[in-house]
Amino acid sequence: MVGEHEKRRTVVTVGEQYRVVRDAPSFPDGLGFNAGELLTLNSLGYSHYDSSFAYEFQTDTGTVKTYWLDDADPIEKLIGTFSR
């Protein structure tokens, strides 16, 4: 899983902009990601308690949304949701 964790850290870059490719939930705020939305990745981190990576994005209006990727989810789920 160490190699997989490294991929989950390096597949996206903090400070870069990403377009939402398909609608997805945002936790814990429940705002959701909407296809076509342009976001900047502010930070990413790992929760050992939740066994998940959390990717924190910000909209151009300043709204912060967090995308969670569980260890059991394939990395393609993240790649298929956000693109540069």
Image (tube, helix red, strand yellow):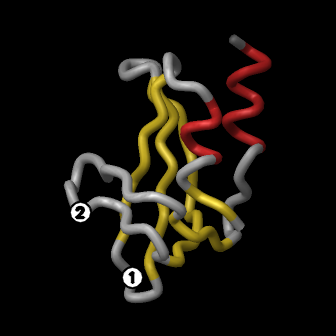
**Viewport quadrant of the C terminus:** bottom right
Please tell me which of labels 2 and 1 falls first in the chain. Answer: 2
Residue shown at 34% from the left, 76% from the top: 63
Q: Amino acid at mark 1?
A: Gly
Q: Around disc 2, counting alpha carbons within 10 Å, would you say few (fewer than 14), some (14 to 19), or many (20 or more)?
A: some
49 vs 83, left or right, is left
Q: Amino acid at mark 2?
A: Leu
Would you place residue 67 above or below residue 64 in this image?
Answer: above
For the residues marked 2 and 1, what is the alpha-carbon distance in whole angstroms?
A: 13 Å
Would you place residue 73 above or below residue 61 in this image?
Answer: above
Q: Around disc 1, counting alpha carbons within 10 Å, would you say few (fewer than 14), some (14 to 19), or many (20 or more)?
A: few
Percent across and percent down for residue 6 are 76, 29
Residue shown at 32% from the left, 52% from the top: 26
Label 1, secondary structure: give it: loop
> Which residue has dot 1 on it?
62
Q: Residue furthest bottom?
A: 61
Location of residue 11 (image quadrant) = top right
Percent across and percent down for residue 78 are 57, 43
Residue shown at 56% from the left, 64% from the top: 42
> Which residue has dot 2 on it?
31
Percent across and percent down for residue 28 are 24, 48
2 vs 53, left or right, is right
Percent across and percent down for residue 32 are 29, 59
Label 2, secondary structure: give it: loop
**Viewport quadrant of the N terminus:** top right
Residue shown at 71% from the left, 52% from the top: 12
Would you place residue 44 above or below residue 47 in this image?
Answer: below
Q: What number is the disc on residue 41?
A: none
Query: Are the residues flagged by discs 2 and 1 in contact, CB closer than 8 Å?
Result: no
